[in-house]
Image: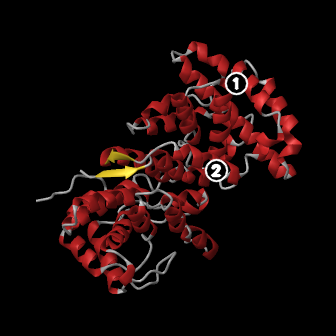
Amino acid sequence: MHTYHINLHETIYSLSDALDLVGVVQVHHGKRVGYMAAECGKAIGLDSTTLDNLFQAAILHDCGVSNTAVHQRLAQFEWEKEAHGHCEIGAAILNTSPPLAHLSNIVLHHHTHWNQFPALDLPEETARLANCIFMIDRVDVLSLKSQVQNANILLAIDEIREKIAARRGDWFCPEWVDVFMEISDSEAFWLALEREHVDGYVDEWIGHETTRAIKFEDLKSIVQIFSYIVDAKSTFTQEHSRGVANLAAYIGRLFNLPEQHCETLELAGLLHDIGKLRVPDDVLEKPDRLSLPEFKIIQRHSFDTFNILKRIKGFEEIALWAGQHHERVSGEGYPYRTKETHLSLEARILAVADVFQALAQDRPYREALAPETILGILKEEAAAHKLDTEVVAMVEAHLLPCWHASLLRAPDLS
């Protein structure tokens, strides 16, 4: 099993860029919440470990949100109905990853009112960190709303601070409110919410973490968090990324690729559709043929995938293979129009695995197809110089095991 050398902070931060795509309008929400929460944590005197936990949990606090409609409701300051649903999903997802499981209870309670915590059996630190994120989450919701209305955050400072202060003691911990009121009294605090400042702030945080060796299974558990988020965006794509990853790794082993390449293929498969979080729900769920404008919206998702993943040192191959999953050997794919000579075997395997798994699942416009029907389509695509003929031939020689692998069933390796 291969060991990867990565900066864990950089990996979490870069992958969380995908979470910011869900809101479409509320871009960089998680990053701003992380920045403001950390500023409150510093002012209150948190130690470095606790501050790091607060910052990571703040960045990931909305990891239970895939649906743009839910995200838009959460952007309403007073909206509390069913708000806990995404908290439960986020906590459950984080619990699947050993490196991040310690953040799950913080995320679980990041919409819990302060006056509700005494009835809960929680460590005091968990309650305090969760409530800090809740308060700052609401601050950012108000700041985004004011910017849409006024285009100048400085015109809304007093109103935002008044609304937060009015919830002191019931929604929010009095100590957090007092610290927030103190540090938010300056114009600089609000002007620092602009992306370039927040990015600089995060660069400093990333710099405090050195590159470390991480086992494949631990890295996979982090990557799977984001594949869960992507696949949950539509009822028709549940487990699509995991199925593509499983099938791509299986085909890679059929080609006798080094095990490291097969593991990296699996990670690329898990992340290949991460850019799809930008796509509006109604486009993904549309039961009819997409219009040209809608298809153009879809076309950018593989570019967004590459753009997110390329920022992570050690993810160079993952970014390239994932970003090329809609390229075709004829050069007629998207978004780069890359031709066969510039497509690695791994990229061509991932492209076939993506098409195969999609055909094996129900979609809004059709039911799942039988293995033989899927193979017929793959062979037509290969004959048209879209999919790689050797990869399709390998699938044909192992059709049923490939079908089982795409549906996350253990294939017959005999």
Which mark is drawn over residue 176?
1
Q: Which residue is drawn at 42% across and 63% down?
A: 316
Identify residue type, mark 2.
Answer: Gly
Q: Answer above or below: position of 38 versus 279.
A: above
> Is residue 404 shown to the viewer in this render?
yes
Q: Residue at x 80, y 25 (%)?
A: 165
Q: Answer above or below: position of 386 versus 100.
A: below
Identify residue type, mark 1.
Answer: Trp
Q: Residue 375 occupies which quadrant of the picture?
A: bottom left
Few, some or many C-alpha atoms within 10 Å of disc 2 (few <14, some 14-19, many ≥20)? few
Instruction: Please name whichever residue, 132 or 375, is drawn nearer the observer in this view of the structure.
Output: 132
Which mark is drawn over residue 161?
none
Given the current orientation, which residue lies at the most extreme top position?
A: 118
Q: Where is residue 402 in the image (x, y as percent from the top left)?
A: 25, 63
Q: Answer above or below: position of 239 versus 50.
A: below
Q: Where is residue 34 in the image (x, y as percent from the top left)?
A: 62, 40
Gap in angstroms between the C-alphas marked 2 and 1: 25 Å
Element type at mark 2: helix
